[in-house]
Amino acid sequence: MKELHVFNSLSRQKELFTPINPPFVGMYVCGPTVYGPAHLGHARSAITFDIVFRYLKFLGYKVRYVRNITDVGHLVNDADAGESKIEKQARLERLEPMEVAQRYYNSYIEDLTALNLQRPSIEPRATGHITEQIEAVEAILANGYAYESNGSVYFDVAKYNEDYQYGKLSGRDLENILNTSRENLVGQEGKRNPADFAIWKKADPEHIMRWNSPWGEGFPGWHIECTVMSTKYLGTKYDIHGGGMDLLFPHHEAEIAQSNACNHHLDTDDRDEAKYWLHNNMITYEGKKMGKSLGNAINLRGFFSGIHWTKLQDHMTVKEGMELRDAQDEDGENFKEINLLSQAYTPMTIRFFILQAHYRSTLDFSNEALQATEKALKRMNEAIKRLQGISHKGKMLAINEEFEKNLSSFLEDVKEELNDDFNTARVIARMFDTLSVINQLYKESKNIFAVNPDTFDKFRNDFLAVYQDILGLRAESEEAEESNDLLDGVMQLLIALRGDARKEKNWAMSDTIRDELAKLSVKLEDSAKGTDWFLDK
Ligand SMILES: [Zn+2]
């Protein structure tokens, strides 16, 4: 496509992207609830919107990207009952709730940095916007779309539905919503209607995170923070709202309702909080949903280290390269544990794996799939190195028209794919299509150069821009491997020189080598097999 089109969950179709206030673009993405380590699902959502952020900037837009941090209000069962996710973790770890939030926020950012994500423009926290959330609840009450019940305030879905349409984003009708929410009534006694949701919750005596409000001590409901923080930093009407598909209902549906109930412009059709709603799909493991109870919710740290021990379950297939071990539970029951990862995967392998699928399709991972990705990425990185090394200065030209065409249209081809709802999968396919040209140019560049040098220079710049700036890839692991190889090569040389010195009984020389290396924390260990070296830090 010649111009950017995005799939809008609101209209359920691809739409031409026209920002409200060009060249400015406002984008709000729901960030994590920081009560545990980040997993592959977090990575997919963050990478999806990192691509949107990068590509919009590449197109020349000035993007304000807001991604919130949920540090209060998100209850264990995602509805209005149960313990706070953060407070529960705080109890388990014997920490302050804010210590839990800080700990997992830090590790989230570290993991995302390893995946080469660009930081958003603003990262607001729910606890930093309590006043604004109370004001929003007051406004919704004043407009008649909420009611107070025993210290909690609930959003009145039926009342809202008289004036607006609750369910327009998720495509559910109210009857359907009412039927599904009836199943889970525990802790929801104050509601007039099971479909209603809390916008302010009364704090039980044991609840730690609590604030004064016109309705007594309590804390905000989970959905209200996003309405408030998006409005505060992007205005009541802005361009893009993003998040995982699991947030579409009830979280995003509730956000739209709250926003309309707050602003209350019944006289206009143009009243949805954000213009385009983008949702990334989920990741499965060998065709199954990922979840704690299934034992397959692997943290990013697990992928980076290659370690994810979990109880062996019936749905798991033990494959070559997977380790098993015996374990015992608290009651002394024996069971088998399996390491679901047969090796470690670098952050760039994970990033590339996620980019190889379009963000709206489900993505299934397995060790085999990740290993295939690792190989593909290696091929790509080798080609990048060659591309950077190709020199065409003063070479004889014999233009190969097919090459010429392939290379000169590269960036336009890539943009066509990205303009089609950020199709990174097809961008990567386009890149692989040019690898053979790169390889051939590299081989032949010593004799002839088959494309116009200007075409080549432009292609090289474009290819690197797509690789680094738009897809956000970098050759970190290879560099690390290379410097390790180099260090080992130098060490083998020193070890051989020391061996020669010893043979010649030049003890002064051999001792100098050993002592000087020791000062650099390099230790040598002699054995019958030879000399080994290791870093002793
Ligand atoms: Zn949100």
Image: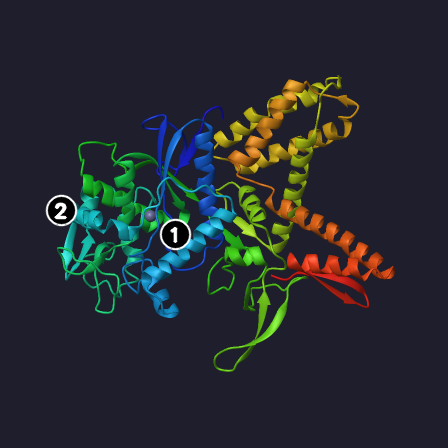
Frontmost residue, 520 versus 192: 520
* Identity of the residue drawn at 64% across and 44% down: 479
Furthest residue toward bottom: 332
Task: Using the rendered view, name the quadrant where residue 276 is placed.
Answer: top left
Residue denoted by label 2: 144
Which colour scheme appears in the figure? Answer: rainbow
Please give the name of the residue rendered at 72% of the width and 32% of the height, measured from the top-left corner.
439
Observer able to see residue 318: yes
Q: Residue extending furthest right?
A: 504
Q: Quadrant of residue 406?
A: top right
State the SS at label 2.
loop
N-terminal of the pair, mark 2 or mark 1, is 1
Counting from the top left corner in percent of width and height, residue 103 is at 40, 58
Question: Is 370 placed above or below 524 here?
Answer: above
- Depth check, mark 2 against mark 1: the one in front is 1
Quarter-wise, where is residue 453 in the image? top right
Q: Nearer the viewer, residue 138 or 449?
A: 449
Q: Viewed as shown, does residue 337 lie left or right of 189?
A: right
- Residue at 24 percent of width and 42 percent of height: 259
- Residue 496 lies, in percent from the top left, at 81, 55
**Residue type pointed to by label 2:** Gly
How far across and down, in percent of the image, does residue 350 sit? 56, 48
- Of residue 253 and residue 507, the one placed in the foreground of this image is 507
User: What residue would you read off at disc 1?
Assistant: 32
- Residue 459, compared with residue 36, is above or below; it is above
Three-letter residue code for mark 1: Pro
